[in-house]
Image (cartoon, rainbow, N blue to C red):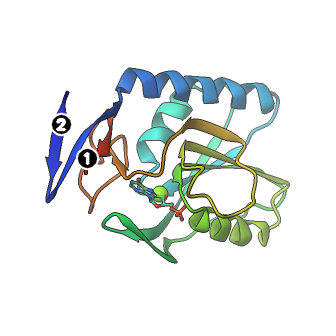
Amino acid sequence: MKTIQLKDKTFRINFTSEEILKQVNRVASEIDRDYADKTPLIIVVLNGAFMFASDLMKAMDINCEISFVKLSSYEGTQSTEKVKEIIGLNQNIEGREIIIVEDIVDTGITMENLLADLHKMKPNSIRVATLLFKPESFRKDFKIDYIGLSIPNDFIVGYGLDYDQLGRNLSDIYIITE
Ligand code: IMP
Ligand code: MG
């Protein structure tokens, strides 16, 4: 079993890059199907979603635009439950079809905050695409339209996700070992 060490924590492989890309491609075809003849604006939540967003967009065939917001709520392996906006949106989204692309929906606090902010900007529609979802930890009630993989409530790294900023470059996803 392949394990890696990041600072004080050990992680073992959970999803290979092949398994991840299979789900990314599936989500891309669902989006292609739902947005045929539309030009959605993909809003990527930095930092974690950069790798997912890149592979997702490469697999999509429809016309689309991309923009970024930078939010932060985690310190170490715990959510601080406070969402910091580090870089906001610098464009008008009124009347647009928006797809938020996120690495992981955990408690849902980050996404709920972002949804509330974006709704104020009067887009025509907003959908949520997340690579990973932790159903046991989710405490909100917004709809998640596209989910790559549902996972148990354990801390993971890789494919954009970090432990104290490390591990984002791994092409597989690793789970913490206790
Ligand atoms: P939420 O606000 O609790 O839904 O947390 C969402 C954010 O926390 C995500 O955008 C991630 O950046 C981060 N996060 C949640 N769970 C994990 C994890 O298991 N590993 C790394 N980051 C995580
Ligand atoms: Mg994130």
Query: In the rendered structure, which amino acid carries the disc numbered 1?
Result: Thr
Tell me where residue 95 sits by quadrant.
Answer: bottom right
Q: Is residue 22 left or right of residue 165?
A: right
Q: Is residue 129 left or right of residue 134?
A: right
- For mark 2, give the secondary structure: strand
Q: Is residue 48 left or right of residue 76?
A: right
| Contact, mark 1 vs mark 2 (Cβ under 8 Å) | yes
Between 141 and 37, the one nearer to me in the picture = 141
Residue type indicated by callout 2: Thr
- Say which quarter of the image contains residue 171: top left
Residue 95 has which mark? none
- Answer above or below: position of 36 versus 118: above
Q: Which residue is mark 2?
A: 3
Q: How many marks?
A: 2
Residue underneath mark 1: 177
Residue furthest toward the front?
Answer: 178
**Relative to residue 165, is residue 40 drawn left or right?**
right
Q: Residue at x 19, y 30 (%)?
A: 2
**Residue situated in front as seen by the camera: 140 or 52:** 140
**Image x and y of residue 176, in percent:** 29, 48
Mark 1 lies on a secondary structure that is loop
Residue 89 in sight here: no
